[in-house]
Amino acid sequence: MTVELVYLALSIVLAFIQLLLPIGIATRARGLAWNAGPRDVPMPPLDGLGGRLERAHRNMMETFPLFVGAVAVAHFAGAHNWLSMGGAALYFWARLAYVPLYAFGVPYVRSLVWTVAMAGMFLVLLSPLV
């Protein structure tokens, strides 16, 4: 398995963990009966840490399909170079750093880290061109 595919797999695990974190907080706040039930009654959005973790996960889901596409393009083009490997690493590690930064409400640095992740994704996408 290539380095890029390893980082893709790690990013899938990260997305899954990010899915579970706000669910755990929601279950604690709203109760197990709510979580196991049909959720017919709308609940107010999570606030505080739970809300930030939920928004961080939603942000991951907005960028992740683009990363999958970039890795697929590089993989099927046979690009396995410093751009594809470095870009995939940048995307994963920046997305990993993004979670606690968002969870603790750190402004500006969080946006910078998001930009690094996007730059990593673009490096992967550009890798077949070199």
Image (cartoon, grey):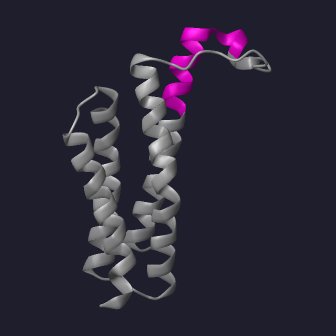
In the image, residue 23 sits, relative to residue 75, either above or below, namely: above
Q: Is residue 116 above or below residue 75?
A: above
Where is residue 28? Give x, y as percent: 55, 11
Q: Residue at x 51, y 75 (%)?
A: 72
Q: Which residue reaches farthest left?
A: 109
Residue at (50, 41) in percent of width and height = 58
- Quadrant, the C terminus: bottom left
Please give left or right for residue 15 compared with residue 116 in the image: right
Query: Residue 94 at x, y = what percent?
Result: 29, 51
Please identify the quarter of the rendering in which residue 10 is found.
Answer: bottom left
Tell me if residue 75 can be seen. Answer: yes
Q: Is residue 65 left or right of residue 97?
A: right
State whether the magenta stretch is mostly helix, strand or loop.
helix
In terms of depth relative to the viewer, which is nearer, 112 or 7?
Answer: 112
Measuring 34% from the left and 28% from the top, which residue is drawn there? Answer: 103
Q: Magenta segment: does it hold 27?
A: yes
On screen, residue 40 above or below 129? above
Residue 129 lies in the magenta stretch: no
What span is in magenta?
20-34
Q: Position of residue 20 (x, y in %)?
A: 54, 32
Asked whether residue 80 appears in the rendered view, the answer is no
Where is residue 49 drawn, in percent x and y? 39, 20
Residue at image position (45%, 44%) is 59
Numbered marks: total: 0
